[in-house]
Amino acid sequence: MKYSRLIVRKGITRKGKEGKEMEKRSINYYTLRNIDRLPQYQHLPDDDKFALRVVGNVLPFRVNSYVIDELIDWNAIPDDPIYRLTFMHRDMLRPEQFDRMADVIRCGADRHDIEQTANAIRSALNPHPAGQLTRNVPVFEGELVPGIQHKYGDTCLVFPRNGQTCHSYCTFCFRWPQFVGTEGFKFATDESRRFQAYLNAHREVSDVLFTGGDPMVMNASNLEAYILPLLHPDFEHIRTIRIGTKSVAYWPFRYVTDPDADRVLKLFSDVVRSGKQLALMAHFTHWREIETPVAREAIRRIRSTGAVVRTQCPIVRRINDDPSVWSRMWTDQVSLGCFPYYMFVERDTGPNHYFSVPLVRATEIYAEAMRGISGLARTARGPVMSTYYGKVCIDGVAVVHGERVFALRFLRARNPAWNNRPFFARFDARARWLSDLKPAFGSERFFFEAQAHDREKRTHGFAQPSAHMNHAARPIATNGQRNGL
Ligand code: SF4
């Protein structure tokens, strides 16, 4: 089998479940700077090479040797899903955006001019949907806490400073601004680690999610520096430590043969032994990512520490917008002891016009994927939009009093009173995000827009944008309260 050819060899380092030896690997990265050294790249048509260079100067491009050698089927490009997942296509930019950058490159502009053009295009790509750089950053003792987002009362997101890259970059990633090197787009903890004092003071926080980028690009020592302090009795209110990661898909050697793999797994065991749950929120886009022996061995080793693996991913057009991909992926994950958790809707940022699917299609994919799979594999919720107001699940399409509507529901909301509250939107076959939807039954605004509007006026003296606006950047609160609804 193609995938096992390079990974399983005799007599090298670690034995997997079936007694085969796992080869120790070093990760090699390819970016625009060195992609022309990749043998497979030489066989791409010139147009595709140029498109990669144009789009890759605006959006982040990085792919590693494991993805290239083991995951991409080079006989099936350009439609191969893992190729689409990691290599740019020209239509990821709008034609005018593509032509603008192409012209700059063709005329031999210097780095400064390319970067200026790139930043102008990036600013038009809604770089921070749902107001992430402003609305979710908490204030503590009169100052913002760098690298934290606190949107839901019980869950706090931490963006470790050294974990803001990934083993490869996904072409559809909504966190793309983190990776393009522009200062105003970056988001991470600073050296002061004030987030720990913040967490200590906020006893309502039960879950801490380390996210990025990918925290699992950090070495064991850095991971320990972030996680071990939370095992101290001062943080007994924190019950679950989650790590959001795509490392099992993109670099499973992290848990198997990397020099500090055992130390990472010991850290996971220490968390579990302390009485807290360690949940690896694993990002898988396609079943191909869990087919390799080393990925399976990574999952086995992670689970052997007592950690749980929960899986999530958006529906991405041209990559996994097919019910059979999801049903196979969820079924395989359950066989490996993982718990399918979320099917997301692709966010309204970056190359969303290229990768998103209409909401009605997303509901069909979810419903069809659920049919015919075991009950144990039906734990994934979806399709879910992670919006400014909270996580909105599209439960389906219904007809109420003769009106065709989307039935929607908050799974998590900024205002806990909205949790699980159903609401309805007029059916729109083209809608791809909450901002495309209008309330059903003749209402002017959704109930949460009206409440958020009143709250914003009371708090800031101005009203916040409606759900029908994509951009949500607003001034930052300066009082001592958590910044948000
Ligand atoms: S691994 Fe996650 S954060 Fe990194 S590029 Fe992919 S989707 Fe984005």
Image (cartoon, helix red, strand yellow):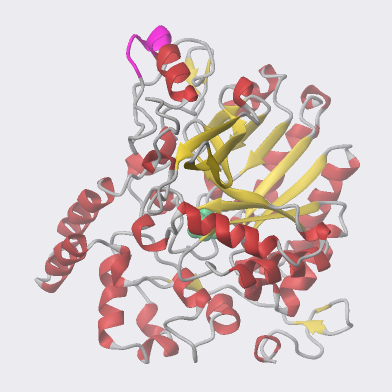
Residue 252 image-quadrant placement: bottom right
Give residue 12's position: percent from left, percent from top. Answer: 78, 85
Q: Return the residue nearer the eye: 396 or 87.
A: 396
Residue 443, picture quadrant: top left
Is 458 within the magenta? Answer: yes
Residue 61 in the image: x percent, y percent? 40, 66
Residue 327 in percent (x, y) is at 69, 67
* Magenta residue check for 72: no
- Asked whether residue 191 appears in the rendered view, the answer is no
In depth, the one of 196 and 472 nearer the eye is 472
Q: Which residues are magenta?
A: 457-463
Dividing the image into 4 quarters, which one contains the N terminus? bottom right
The answer to whether residue 8 is above or below residue 157 is: below
Kindly identify the residue that appears in the image at 34 percent across and 39 percent down.
470
**Residue 298: horizontal and vertical position, in percent?**
76, 67
Q: Is residue 399 above or below residue 453?
A: below
Closer to us: 270 or 358? 358
Residue at figure coordinates x 39%, y 21% from the top left = 476
Q: Is residue 393 above or below residue 67?
A: above
Residue 296 in sight from this viewpoint: yes
Q: Is residue 457 left or right of residue 338?
A: left
Residue at the location (56% across, 51% down)?
A: 344
